[in-house]
Image: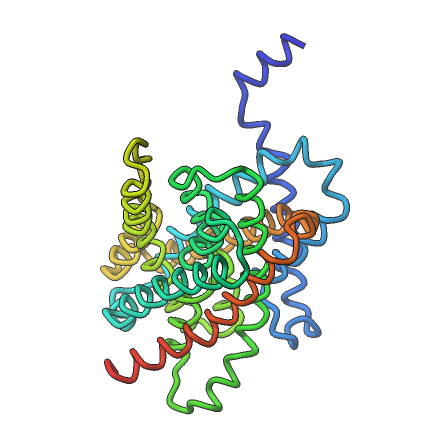
Amino acid sequence: MTELSIAKSHHPVPLWIPGLLLTVVIAGAASWLAQQPVIAALGLGSLTLAIMLGILVGNSIYSPLASRCDNGVLLAKQKLLRLGIILFGFRITLQQIADVGFSGILIDALTLSSTFFMTCLLGMRLLKLDRDTVWLIGAGSSICGAAAVLATEPVVKAAPSKVAVAIATVVLFGTLAIFIYPLLWPLAHHLFPGLSAVQFGVFTGSTIHEVAQVVAAGHSISPDAENSAVIAKMLRVMMLAPFLLCLSTVLRGKHQGKTRQPTTFPWFALLFIAVALFNSLQLLPAAVVATLNQLAGLLLAMAMAALGLTTRFGALYEAGVKPLLLGALVFVWLIAGGGTINLLVQYFMG
């Protein structure tokens, strides 16, 4: 037993291999399915299929594999997702960032603040949920899903059970958004004929919970929608740090005796912008950029598979009705309220 422990401590990389291989297999299966005419006719892209297959495997045969695969799956879900998003910057140019522009920043800021306010109002006043659960769900819904929940947890010092409930809630409704938003696009375009794919992409990036879910939904709509959705989402993710600073300031005012927790800046979002700016200079050969784009696609598909593998229906069942109801109400607000904010800002600044 001691020799095994020593071997593990000196060779940590093999611990990641089973989980990474599982995500690669799921990503490969999703890519193959996406190319089948029947599946393609449904508008399901490889990223959407990867999370669907991940959920299917995660809630069926994954349990006996979890002890061997968890390290690699978590690596794909966290590190590879961020690396994939950074490399996604090679699909973006300065002109596309400028197209999102100040209006995109304003949309993100208004959507974030109004969503968090609505979550607090509905959660604490209407549903009588405890403050920590409401704040965690509000952070996850307003900014970037599970990552925002985990970043908010040390600030509010929430119990692990409440963190699990919040993550399960935002993952559920963010996953639903992957399928709903591509259906909303033709409806929105019919109701507002002047609405472009880029503008709908900004709406997608400013209202869907997780980065991975934004990529999957945008990918199912169009390349233009996907690009603007990711840009809007990255701008929104970068608002996590000031959000946490504001939250910790509020808590410090209520609990003067407690020390403030340090906040972490989402550097991957800044690196995404830096890569996009570098890509605008067109210094790399087209073949190299194409290879980097393929690598980004693979990493993102692996991250989708990992997100699906770690989505447990049991966690939602244990959460009870009220957190799920809150998540549903906030989800409706993100579509209706977030859509209204997008239309108003784009109208007055267009």
Front-most of residues 21 and 338? 338
| Quadrant showing the N terminus | top right
Residue 57 rendering spot, x and y as whole percentages: 72, 49
Q: In the shown orientation, is residue 290 left or right of residue 123?
A: left
Name the quadrant containing residue 41. Answer: bottom right
Q: In the shown orientation, is residue 241 left or right of residue 339?
A: left
Count every numbered label the image shows and give the total. 0
Name the quadrant containing residue 61. Answer: top right
Residue 158 rendering spot, x and y as whole percentages: 48, 40
Q: In the shown orientation, is residue 12 left or right of residue 258?
A: right
| Residue 212 sits above or below residue 67 on the image | below
Front-most of residues 241 and 310? 241
Evaluate whether residue 291 shows in this view: no
Evaluate whether residue 28 shows in this view: yes
Front-most of residues 5 and 238? 238
| Residue 274 sits above or below residue 9 on the image | below
Residue 251 rendering spot, x and y as whole percentages: 33, 43
Q: Residue at x 30, y 53 (%)?
A: 275
Residue 47 rendering spot, x and y as whole percentages: 56, 60
Q: Residue at x 54, y 27 (%)?
A: 13
Q: Residue at x 37, y 69 (%)?
A: 228
| Quadrant showing the C terminus | bottom left
| Residue 211 sits above or below residue 254 on the image | below
